[in-house]
Amino acid sequence: MENKKIIIDPVTRIEGHAKITIDLDCDGKVEDAKIHVTQYRGFEKFCEGRMYTEMPAITARTCGICPVSHVVASTKAIDEILAVTPPQAGINIRKIINLAQILQSHTLNFFHLSSPDFIYGFDAPKEDRNIFKMMQTHPVMAKDGIILRAFGQKIIEELGGKRIHPTGITPGGAAKKIEESQKEMILKEIPNAMKIAQGALKYFKENLHKFQKEIDSFATFPSLFMALINPDGTLEHYDGVLRFIDSEGNILEEGIDPQNYKDYIGEAVEEDSYLKSPYYKPLGYPMGMYRVGALARLNIASTCGTPLADEELKNFKALGGGKPVLNSFYYHYARLIEIIYAIEKIEELLNDDETISETVRRTSKVSKNRGVGCSEAPRGTLFHEYHVTKEGVITAVNLIIATGNNNLAMNAGIKQAALAFVDGNNITDGALNRVEAVIRCFDPCLSCSTHALGIVSSKIEVRDHNKNIIKVIERN
Amino acid sequence: MRIIIGYGNELRGEDAFGVDVIKELQKLSLKDTKLISVFQLTPEIVLEMLDADEIIFIDTCSNEKNHYKLACSLTQQNGLNLSHHIAPKTIIYMLESLYDKRPSFFIYSMMSSSFDEIMDLKKYRECVDIVVKHLLD
């Protein structure tokens, strides 16, 4: 049998545009598999020459789904350049908006992108394995997803000014204080949001037993993990320091100031993808593969710091038997716990008297020529690094995006799934769907990670070793 | 109630067409009409449309050959999709399947090939005016 290459292009039910190639050997067995991110926008370059004050608005446009993360990281980088510490109310407002975005983003992934796989199974006919079928058979779940996402978006709109590309987070703090009426409006919706979140978690756990093979082979391997964490070991999405742990749970680096991230993270470039491959520098490339995002955050944190999330965190950590959970399928589990955490934390922050203080912003002038902003985006740790002249003109920009951090792990994951499920002599839609589903575990935002805008459509091509297309599968 | 929703990115040249139509309509006093202006259509926007008898979508449609031509059909629209942004048909599908709502709906699209800048402001404004006038008639 001649060598063949399977190409899945584009990958579906993710944010952005990518294709997967699977190389088969002469016996039709999987030899290698890779994800290629195929678009490029060049934010780092065209930001040069702009005033630092424009950066939050410009970099928010990197993405339509997680603009809040970019605004948070961007304003934190500028805070550094201005050498300004926002007032606590400003910090709390930023935290609430960031948590609202994590909530709505995780909700979209579970309820609308990944749920068809959980409900109908990975081998279900593709006509049935989609959100539209789910609306017919599970309308309550579909509506719950809409309500929960609307809750997150409403918070962003109320406190940030706009649902998409909000302007309420500004260098030095926030643009305006939280009004009592806004606080009450949000608090009123907390019980229903929590009920929906707990219902989703219950559904997920009750159905987990159906997916043992996927749990075992969807990017299940040793790797490092990285996340922000508070000094007391609690979960953190806004502040804190960076921590690396290994697959045994040993702390490799503790208390890393995000300003020094370049001492620990290198960025490799592969010629077949616009998505860079960050790695842990002390171990080199590609040995320094690490994972970020909800799975990493919950592996690294000892507690969430909120009661309901902590209760579930115990069950999550039990899966690892005292060590980090290595199965990327459990990203879904971790995201559901983080939704619960986000709801609890938003309530806690809103009930903090500091949050509704009058003073939400401090101003200053350019004091340093470099600043790094770091936060936890829905998909993982996000870095914005800016260099400026003393007049505040941007001279250099480096962005490490959450999804990029996971690039090496995503590649290793699709290879593992391809080896487990793809038979070159009998290529099934279910097998290819599983390879895609590995990527959906990471919930990548490729629009962000390459700073490229993608269009999601549905086409799978199978090519032989001469790159002739021998099979095409249309998904829509 | 009639809902008119214009959507597009104001930083992307003629993609702002739907938003600009809404801006003109906001200057008028339209009876029993709700005006919505958004960057993109998202799943939760369906919650704002539950009381609609009629929904009118206004957007820009990428088409290099018919620049500044106006269309009022669904043929140029994307099919069903659902991600962080969705197609008008998906909203209609969600209203029907999840909420048992069946509003009549139309889509006004301006054909454009310019998503960096407004190529011809006079023609662009004429298109805005035509759609506004049509909606008022």
Image (tube, coloured by chain):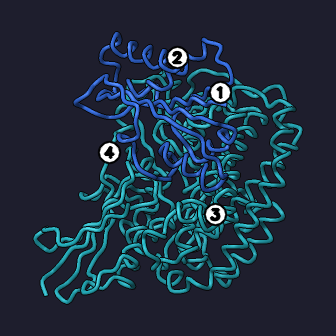
| Horizontal relation, residue B120 to residue A74: left or right | left
Please tell me whether mark 3 sits on a helix, a strand or a loop: helix
Q: Earlier in the sequence, mark 2 or mark 1?
A: 1
Q: Nearer the viewer, mark 3 or mark 1?
A: 1
Q: Nearer the viewer, mark 2 or mark 1?
A: 2
Residue that appears at 55% across and 46% down: B91
| Picture layout, residue B108 above or below residue A352 | above
The answer to whether mark 3 and mark 1 are in CB contact below 8 A is: no
Q: Which residue is mark 2?
A: B137
Give the label on residue A40, or none: 4
Please tell me whether mark 1 sits on a helix, a strand or a loop: strand
Question: How many C-alpha atoms fall within 10 Å of the one at disc 1: few (<14), some, or many (≥20)?
Answer: some
Question: How many C-alpha atoms fall within 10 Å of the one at disc 4: few (<14), some, or many (≥20)?
Answer: some
Residue that appears at 58% across and 47% down: B43
Q: Which residue is mark 3?
A: A335
The answer to whether mark 2 and mark 3 are in CB contact below 8 A is: no
Name the kind of residue labelled 2 in the image: Asp
Q: Which residue is mark 1?
A: B34
Residue that appears at 53% across and 60% down: A132
Rendering colour (chain A)? cyan
Q: Chain for mark 1?
A: B
The quarter of the rendered structure image containing the N terminus of chain A is: bottom left
Name the kind of residue labelled 3 in the image: Arg
- Quarter of the rendering containing residue A120: bottom right
Q: Chain for mark 4?
A: A
The answer as to whether the residues below labels 4 and 1 share one chain is no
- Quarter of the rendering containing residue B97: bottom right
Q: Nearer the viewer, residue A147 or A109?
A: A147
| Distance from the alpha carbon under mark 4 to that under mark 1 | 38 Å
